[in-house]
Amino acid sequence: MRKLVIIPTYNECENIAQIIDRVFSLPEEFDILVVDDGSPDGTASIVGGLQGTHAGRLHILEREGKLGLGSAYLTGFRWALERDYDWIFEMDADFSHNPDDLVRLYQTAIGEGADVVIGSRYVSGVNVVNWPLPRLLISWCASRYVRIMTGMPVKDATAGFVCYSRRVLQTIDLGAVRMKGYGFQIEMKYTAWKLGFRVREVSIVFVDRTAGTSKMSSGIFGEALLGVLKLRLRHIKGVSK
């Protein structure tokens, strides 16, 4: 089983080398694709310098300009499908997602026959460290809102730590995915669920970054909340599944 971890980056020079080393030290073998949006801090150069050490396993796509999280993942998904990866993972570069949990997501997919496995902050209580209370409440309420509006039985709909089977990404019309920020995470999970794929959540501990700068903004959440209404309306009208 070929496994690829997609890591979108923008100004992650303080984290990228360490996160790459951690992924490659895992007992399971994962390849890495970094999708860098023109980081002016030299993130791409750091990755390029490590490619000789990890020949054939570390890859990078350099894009011009900050094109967004959803766009980065969609680019990575297509790249992975073209190269016959069986399992494709989303993960942040800033250690808010523990690389060790990649193995747990993969083992759940294989052991339980799941098509989508979500590293969930809220499936067993609230497992978030170092977030200010207002941000935590916004995130938790957003996921609650998604469950109410869509009926999707996922407690962490905005989670960015996800494992997809190849079959899911082949079946979803990636060109029809409309949301680009954190709403992209909701849209992908919702679409997979509506198509009948088996979705599971695995409890993780999410730790806020200690190096680098957060890319979170109120606009990102605004797009996600409005996008959920549009997703629901598209389904009701029969425009999409």
Image (tube, helix red, strand yellow):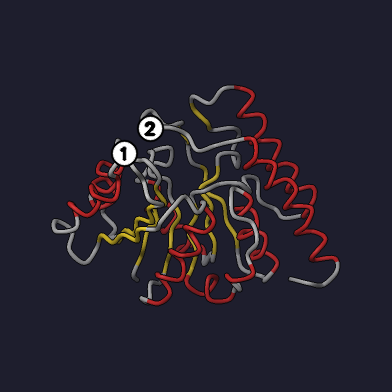
Q: Position of residue 167 (x, y in %)?
A: 52, 75
Would residue 49 be found to the left or right of residue 226 on screen? left
Specify the label residue 66 is tagged with: none
The spot of residue 13 in percent (x, y) is 30, 39
Decide: is 232 above or below 220.
below
Which element type, helix, strand or loop, lies under badge 2? loop
Viewer-proximal residue, 181 or 53? 181
Q: How far is the residue under mark 1 from the one under mark 2?
A: 7 Å
Marks 2 and 1: in contact by CB < 8 Å?
Answer: yes
Which of the pair 60/113 is nearer the observer? 60
- Image position of 55 with respect to 150: above or below: below
Q: Which quadrant, please, contains the N terminus? A: bottom left
Quadrant housing residue 10 = top left
Residue at the spot of label 2: 212
Q: Residue at x 60, y 42 (%)?
A: 123
Name above or below for residue 177 compared with residue 67.
below
Quarter of the image where one finds residue 86 = bottom left
Q: Which amino acid does label 1 sit on?
A: Asn
Give the mark nearer the N terminus: 1 vs 2: 1
Query: What is the residue that sits farthest to the right in this orientation?
Result: 237
Q: Which residue carries the number 1 mark? A: 15
Crowd rating for badge 1 (residues with CA inside 10 Å; few <14, some 14–19, many 20+): some
Say which of 164 and 28 sits in front. 164
Task: Pinpoint residue 158: horizontal percent, then vertical percent.
Answer: 61, 46
Looking at the image, residue 171 sits to the left or right of residue 226; the answer is left
Name the residue at 56% across, 46% down: 159
Q: Give neighbour class at mark 2: few <14, some 14-19, many 20+ (Cα, 10 Å).
A: some
Query: x and y percent of residue 129 in the render?
Result: 49, 27
Q: Residue furthest left?
A: 53
Tell me the quarter of the image containing the C terminus. Answer: bottom right
Q: Which amino acid does label 2 sit on?
A: Gly
* Secondary element at image label 1: loop
